[in-house]
Image (cartoon, rainbow, N blue to C red):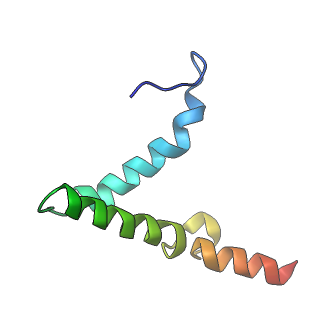
Amino acid sequence: MQSMSRKGNCLDNAMMENFFGIMKSELLYPNTFRNMDHFKQELRKYIEYYNNDRIKLRLNGMSPVQYRTHNAVLS
């Protein structure tokens, strides 16, 4: 699908392109899905995992939830 950003502004899509690349390598390529409904179910679980449990080095080795909780305690 064509981007809706201004001409020549590729940075608008950088975050989503990064997510899609990670999602493909962690979910799509290593697995086989029975049908589209099975894929959608697994994708929902993956997005939940990605947003809440996945360890990220740029967050000092914490999941996003742990990082937000840690920073809230420090504030």
Return the x and y of residue 14 as percentages of the image width and height.
Answer: 53, 39
Determine the residue located farthest toward the bottom in the rendered image.
Answer: 73
Q: Quadrant of the N terminus?
A: top left
Q: Is residue 39 something one can see in this rendering?
A: yes
Return the x and y of residue 51 as percentages of the image width and height.
Answer: 52, 67
Return the x and y of residue 13 as percentages of the image width and height.
Answer: 53, 36
* Residue plotted at (44% across, 72% down): 49
Return the x and y of residue 12 as percentages of the image width and height.
Answer: 59, 33
* Residue plotted at (29% across, 66% down): 41
Q: As drawn, is 42 to the left or to the right of 63?
A: left
For this rendering, which residue is in front, 72 or 35? 35
Give residue 47's quadrant in the image.
bottom left
Q: Quadrant of the C terminus?
A: bottom right
Q: Is residue 30 something one can see in this rendering?
A: no
Give residue 25's quadrant in the image.
bottom left
For this rendering, which residue is in front, 40 or 14? 40
